Image (cartoon, rainbow, N blue to C red):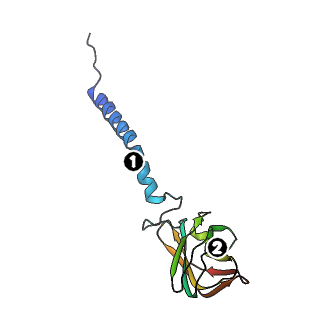
Amino acid sequence: MTTQKHPTVPRRGFIATSAILLATEALSPVLAWARATSTESPHGGRRDSTGFEDDPVVTSVTATFDTTTNDKDHDTLLDVAVSNDKGTLIANKTGIGGHWNDHSTNSVVLDVKNALRKSETPAGSVRLDIHPNGNDKWEFNYHIDITYADGSVTERHWDGKVLAQDNATTSDSWSGH
């Protein structure tokens, strides 16, 4: 009586299949990363065909003030608030002090409160409030830079602004990116 041996081909097939499964399992984090980076951003947006997010989130907001012919006194505090057109606060900073000389430029990085998507910020407003200690009249131009996760920036500029103890608030708005 002859004993029949198992053919070696299925055995080699089993070994080859096992090796492929082990390699796939070892590479699965790499493959998952490659899939994610090809279509999703770390900020939850989708990437377009160029690799940039199609709807990135706000990562920073900066207000830059160009004092013209009348300085801001050292004891006058400034509050800045930037909101979208729905009234959602994007970023703000309160109690900004310091003397800002005539013909000087001062930038303030605001605190991001809501990392809204670019599609949620097509329009919005800036509110500036001063809290002078006594009398102060400040004349200035300013701009706001809203930076998004894909590196794009929305910049809005306003000129000829004046704040004083009897006119301590101003609001400006923008529309369109």
Residue drawn at 32 percent across, 35 percent down: 19
Per the image, the residue denoted by label 1 is: 30
Q: Give the camera-side residue of 140 and 126.
A: 140
Per the image, the residue denoted by label 2 is: 77
Q: Is residue 44 left or right of residue 175?
A: left
Q: Residues within 10 Å of mark 2 (few under 14, many from 20)?
A: some
Q: Residue 89's x, y, as percent?
A: 66, 67
Image quadrant assignment for residue 137: bottom right
Q: Give the camera-side residue of 165 and 62.
A: 165
Looking at this view, name the residue that lies furthest to the right: 166
Q: Residue 60's x, y, as percent?
A: 53, 67
Disc 2, SS? strand
Q: Is residue 157 visible?
A: no
For the residues marked 2 and 1, what is the alpha-carbon distance in whole angstroms? Answer: 51 Å
Residue drawn at 68 percent across, 80 percent down: 171
Q: Classify 16 as above or below 170.
A: above
Disc 1, SS? helix
* Amino acid tagged 1: Val
Q: Residue 92's x, y, as percent?
A: 62, 68
Q: Is residue 13 left or right of residue 110?
A: left
Q: Give the camera-side residue of 89 and 176.
A: 89
* Amino acid tagged 2: Leu
Q: Classify 21 as above or below 31.
A: above
Residue drawn at 46 percent across, 54 percent down: 36
Residue drawn at 41 percent across, 53 percent down: 34
Q: Is residue 150 left or right of residue 133?
A: left
Closest to the camera, between mark 2 and mark 1, is 2
Looking at this view, name the residue that lies furthest to the front: 134
Q: Classify 68 as above or below 147.
A: below
Looking at marks 2 and 1 on the same chain, the residue that comes earlier in the sequence is marked by: 1
